[in-house]
Amino acid sequence: MHVLENNYLKVSINPARGGVITSIFSKSTNDEWIYYDNSRRSTENVFENYDDIWCGGFEELFPNDAPGEVQNRILKDHGELWLQNWNITDHDNNSINLQTECATVPALVSKKIILCQDQPTILINYKIKNISDEEYPFLFKLHPAMRIEQGDELQLEGGRIIQVDSSFSKIIGTHHEFNWPFVNDKSGNNKDISVIPAREKLLQEFIYVKDLKSSWCGLKRKSSNEEFILNFPGKIFPYCWFFMALGGWREHYTVVMEPCTNFPKDMITAIANGTSAFMKSFEKLEFEVSIDIRNGNADI
């Protein structure tokens, strides 16, 4: 485990388990922002089913989400970054640089996690390099699992909500599009989906949000008024998904905020719809995201 720490935050990273951020701890409120339960992950090298051993954390998904064969490549469940042992190429008191090479696509992926010295801000610089002359489709998705409490509020300036899977849904009643954050629930009532319900209600939902009004999403803690703000480049991530395990899915109580390059999760459908990202021959894609922990009265 590698730890970055300043006067505001303590950040824990596990390079051997997908370079996952296992903790973002706010010292001002003594609050943990990341949902992570390592007891759910198998100690054996069994990685075939992502859901069976998923335990949270801030991961990344690449080069796909849903498993399957795409252009003669067999893509693994939720991609392969989450199960890689990332190499530490450099580190100091305020940053760590991690790198891994993919097997399912010819790609070299690196990320540098930086904890700013004098503020509660984390920067993550990503580089994805196509190390071949082949062009191929891909999905890249940020995947932070958030620790939630009843009454917390998911934050997004606006967009159009689409239900991912009606058979999974326990909140949304129809497959229509809705304006964030209101949907029609199973009883036909207008419901604000951004407000976190009690765990005891055993709910779950999975949504895409397209036509985003701005390039950030967040979570506001009701008990402290503190906010976790995830800023991302809108040209790279035109969609934001929310996987909402609200007690009703495998006993998890978390929301995964998922800025994403693609829509929907099925790669073949996204390619056909023109809503998949592509890596060009020898292309090098670089971008940065940031996390700001701040009082809820501050301007974004």
Image (tube, rainbow, N blue to C red):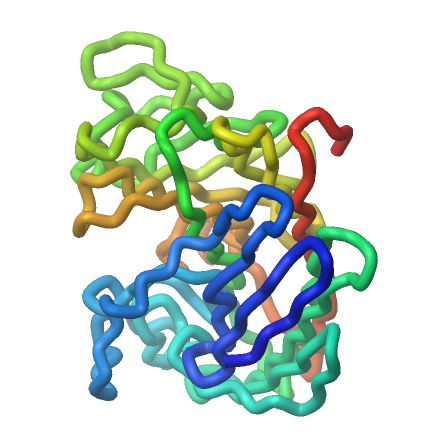
Q: Residue at x 19, y 66 (%)?
A: 52
Residue 254 horizontal/vertical position (percent): 35, 45
Within the image, what quadrant is residue 178 found in?
top left
Q: Is residue 230 left or right of residue 33?
A: right
Q: Is residue 212 left or right of residue 150?
A: right
Q: Is residue 287 left or right of residue 240?
A: right
- Extreme residue in the top direction: 189
Q: Residue at x 20, y 18 (%)?
A: 186
Q: Is residue 274 visible?
A: no
Q: Between residue 267 and residue 80, name the one nearer to us.
A: 80
Residue 266 horizontal/vertical position (percent): 36, 56
Q: Is residue 270 visible?
A: yes
Position above or below: 180 against 55: above
Q: Residue at x 34, y 33 (%)?
A: 163
Q: Is residue 54 left or right of residue 134?
A: left
Position above or below: 282 against 287: below
Residue 287 horizontal/vertical position (percent): 73, 63
Q: Between residue 74 and residue 58, name the one nearer to us.
A: 58
Residue 213 horizontal/vertical position (percent): 66, 30
Q: Between residue 143 and residue 141, name the one nearer to us.
A: 143
Position above or below: 273 against 100: above
Q: Residue at x 74, y 83 (%)?
A: 92
Position above or below: 242 against 53: above
